[in-house]
Structure formats: structure tokens, C-alpha cells
Image: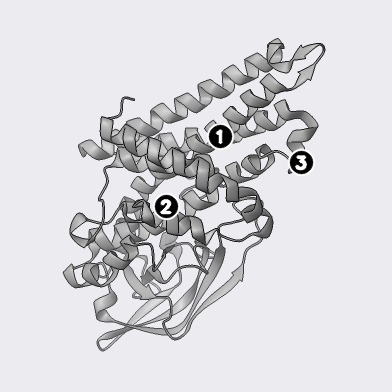
Amino acid sequence: MDLTPGQEAIRETVREFAIEEVRPTAREADETESFPEDVWDGLADIGLTAMTVPEEYGGLDVDGTTYAVCNEELAYGQLSVATALSVHCLATSCIAEFGDDDQKERWLPEMADGRPVGAFALSEPDAGSNPAEMSTEARREGDEYVIDGTKQWITNGVRSGVVVLFAKTQSDDPGTVTQFVVPKDADGLEVGKKEKKLGLRASDTTSLIFDDVRIPEANRLTPEGRGLSAALSILTGGRVGIAAQAVGLAQSALDAAVDYADDREQFGGAISDIQAIRQKLAEMYTKTQAGRTLTYDAARRLDEGRPPSMAASTAKYFASEAAMDVTNEAVQIHGGYGYTTDFPVERLYRDAKITTIYEGTSQIQKKVIARELLD
């Protein structure tokens, strides 16, 4: 897909930042399971933490294609960083889309500057792919809501300062899911244990435990019962971002495999001369490029106001599965070295798996696609 000159300039800026500032931190961040906060401050400096904040609140309010470009290039450097940013942008999107003027003024200018970091609390231990089954309750008491429940798989769980929360106002009624903003320092809000994960290790993932947490009515973002439809509409755009991240991750693995194949010598020459290796690289390139094409098609639909649900799910499904295939082949091309931490492809392979799971598993994406086709 052709980009505008402005989008191309943004791509070059983010790619340079990803290569020079993000990628050098990736190995240590993965090994120590710690987020590179200096990188986050750098993201704020170049405006990426403000991508989904309206201009009147200090943001950039970028179009869907630009958002995809930034996610792709940042994931080219390190998926953990791209994931943390995309969740922050989900939170700012919710406040920008559903908040009133007072809520926007309270939260968005500082979030545009990078802090407080945003979190998005939808999933629960027993309600992941089916959020209507959530049990977290926000019951009304006078001019306050009292929140009880546990949220799971929360990116930025430790780092965040503000949480966009989804809870039922009546625990036995799935039609009462409502969206709230909860300050992280609210009394009764506790961060659970930090998950030990296969990949995405630099990104903190925790539970959030709400025990008699009281927030004012002014912190409710949507009318009661409108929270689930709000979540799904925001997640549609979010899936385009995750698809773009999968493309960036795949491109990183492909580039690493090409470089290694040119450098590694066996049987009297570079292994890039071996037909089997050349065919692998051709397949990897094709899958990466196909994922990119689907992703930018979905982004363009967002920009044009066309129904993006099917396109977003198609892009997210294909690009994430392609990332798994491409990173797997990158490890294979590296041979035994690919199985060690001496080369980045083993981390890329571990990281790729999450793209098939978060913001809707591959199976959920296929369900959406089939529904659009048949129903």
C-alpha cells in the first residue's frame, strides 16, 4: 500500500528510533523481565504516547494507517515495547471516545505526555474470550460505585497509573457491563503477581484485584450497559494494531534470517545459495508481505469509515499466524544457533506466539470472519 509523504516520514522516524533506541534494549529487557523505562520516555518525546489522543488535549489523533505504521515499526524493534504502547493507546482511545469533557481534560493531557501509563482491564480468570461472563461488579451507592472483582492478563499492570475498567453494575445481568476510569492508587486496588511468560517478558502482565474500591460517578465512561459494545468497537481498531505488530515482528525475523543466510557458510559457500534455504526465505517474505497488505487494507477501511470488523479480524488472524511461521523458519535457518540466546530469533519466536492470543485468539478471529460471511 502506498503511504503519503507524511506517513513515510513517520515510518522512517519510528524505524530509526526502533533500531537505535528500542532494539538495543531487547535482550536485557527479556532476560531481566524488566521494562525499559528510558525507551518509554523516548516514545513520549517523539509523540507516540499521544497517538490516540485528540489534538485539543495535546495529542496527535493519528489516522488508522499511521497507527498501523507506528505499531509495525516499533514491533520491528521489540514487541514488548509495542505491546505496552498499544495498550496505553487503547486506554486513551476509550477516554477520548467515550469520556465527557471533564474526563478528557483530567486524564488525556498527561497521558499524551506518557504518564500516567494506561491499562485496559477487560479479561478475567474465568472470562477471557467471552467478556459477557465477567463477574467484576461496580454497584451503585449514592454518587459512587463500589467495585469488587479480579481482572487478569493486564498489560502494564505494574507500570500503569490509570485503568480503563469494565464491570457489571448488576452481577447477574450480562447486559449491564459498563466502562469506568479507575486511578491506580485508589484504595482497595491491588496489583497481583507478575506472570512468568513464554515471551513478551519485558512487558509486565499481572492481575488487578478490586476489593471495595470506591470511585465517584464522574469516573463512569459509558452509560450503564454500554460498556461491552464500547469495548468491542475499540478492540476492532486495536486488532489492526496487533496485526501490524505481527508484521513488524515477522519482518525482523525475515531480515535476521536473510543476513544469517548470507553470512553462514556450509558446503563450500553461503547457505543462501542452497535452494531449500532460498525457498524458505521466499515463503517467509510472501507471508510477511501478505500480512502487511491485509493489515493496511484494514487500516484504510478504518480511515474511510467502512465497516472494519471482518477486515481487522482477517488481518489479525493471518498476520499473527504468519509471524509464528516466519519466526519458526528463521530459527530453523539459524540451525543450532537459532536455539540459543546468542541470536535474536529465539526471542522473536517466543514473542510471536502471543500475537495469536491477545486481543482475540485466532479462533475468535475466525469466528468473526465466519459470522460476517454467513450470518
Q: Residue at the spot x=22%, y=69% of the render?
A: 105
Q: Which mark is residue 86?
A: 2
Marked residue nearer the N-terminal end (3 or 2): 2
Q: Is residue 226 above or below residue 81?
A: below
Q: Tell me where residue 101 sits by quadrant.
A: bottom left
Quarter that holds the C terminus: top left
**Is 292 situated left or right of 34 in this image?**
left
Graded by Cα atoms within 10 Å as few (under 14), some (14 to 19) or many (20 or more), the crowding at tag 2 reads many
Task: Say if mark 3 contacts mark 2, CB within 8 Å.
Answer: no
Mark 3: which amino acid? Answer: Thr
Residue 182 on image: x %, y %: 37, 75
What kind of residue is marked 2? Ser
Q: Give the residue at mark 3.
A: 340
| 279 versus 323 height, above or below | above
Any part of residue 195 in sight? yes
- Residue ID for mark 1: 252
Name which residue lies at 77% across and 29% down.
335
